[in-house]
Amino acid sequence: MHLSFLGPLFDRSGPWATVYFDPAQNDESGAKRRELSVREACRTLEQDGADAATVQAVRDALMGIGPAEDPAGRVVFAAGGEVVLSHRLSRPPQRQIACWAPLPRLTPLLELSGQDPVCLVAYIDRTGADFELRGAAGPQDAGQVEGRQHPVHRTASADWSERHFQLKVENTWEHNAGEIAQALCSAYEECGAELIVLVGDPRERPAVYDRLPEEVRKVTVQTEHGGRAAGSSSSALEEDIEQARQQYTRRHIEEALDRFRAGRVGTDRPTDAVEGVPALVEAAREHRIETLLIRPDGPELGRETWVGSEPDQVATRRTDAQILGEGDPIPVRADDALLRSAAVTAADVLIVPPSDEDGPDIPAGGLGALLRWSYEPASA
């Protein structure tokens, strides 16, 4: 999961109010429960020391959240008397979380928003394609491409002139498939998608797939449901897109864990992965984290670390933070500090499921990372 959408949270200083809110059911009793939940969240913020203006901004935002628009709820981040970011959740929180802290509380967001990749959907017909981006911010238009418009329809006649015309039609289809493939590759590179789903015409769709470069085909899947025409969307298409995203995520996690097991400290070769708060803090200071691995049940997620105003000003001890140039460091949770660093340095973040009972917990303590470059382990 890439955290670029959290950018507004790191463009300003805290402290931060964070509330994960479930709007309950859309009935009279649900409305009363929502009101009580809002009161409880605001009371918790006040008890933690939040200022009145920020509490009021949170109260106003929470009162505007309803089950019709946000059935799974939202997370609200506020500071300095205003809501800076409000993000829709994919799953409702099992319990309401409200806190006032130096950094935004982010780990629950990773669990409740899912890890589905940013997906580029191409709706294809024989004249062109429409592109749509599916990600954390919801569906977004990602452009379109139009190929040759004539001739695109074959006839049933066996006459020589008609067969000649049909050949022109097929040439148009082939030409347009190449145009669509080229435009799709450009859109894929520009929008930062991790997965492509091809939708539409049963002849043109595979023709486009065959014209994609090998590295793009590796992250491309096709579905026979849906099309480019208005009104052709269906529940079957949505299920196929969701299944493709989930399969990509599972494969991505498995590949990351394989790399982690092979590359972590303890081998007799340069290290490609680290685990534990001290090693991760060092990697964060040097911007070496490529992929941050978080196991939500890990005991070290809440370990105290010290941070300054900059994402790379992070240390396990207060004195170390002062050495890094921060005169007045503040204590925060380790996962909050590392997630801030990951977001600002464009690192990927993966939620790792708990290990089975027979195997060791990976990563140890619940926090690990794949590194952007290897380094030699320190000599004993």
Image (cartoon, rainbow, N blue to C red):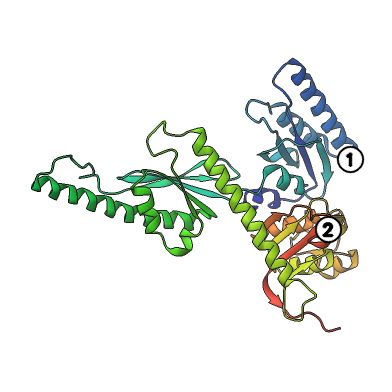
Numbered disc 2: secondary structure: loop
Quarter of the rendering occupied by the C terminus:
bottom right
Q: Horizontal placement of 306 versus 198: left or right?
A: right
Whichever of labels 1 and 2 marks the residue nearer the N terminus, that label is 1
Q: Nearer the viewer, residue 121 or 357?
A: 357
Which quarter of the picture shows residue 56? Answer: top right
Q: Horizontal placement of 41 versus 262: left or right?
A: right
* Location of mark 1 (residue): 48
Amino acid at circle 2: Asp
Task: Give the label on residue 98, or none.
Answer: none
Neighbour tally class for label 1: few under 14, some 14-19, many 20 plus, Cα within 10 Å: some
Residue 303 position (above or below residue 104): below
Neighbour tally class for label 2: few under 14, some 14-19, many 20 plus, Cα within 10 Å: few
Numbered disc 1: secondary structure: helix
Residue 114 percent coordinates (x, y): 67, 45
Alpha carbons under labels 1 and 2: distance apart? 41 Å
Task: Give the label on residue 358, or none.
Answer: 2
Residue 182 percent coordinates (x, y): 37, 57
Residue 297 percent coordinates (x, y): 83, 51
Residue 20 position (above or below residue 206): above
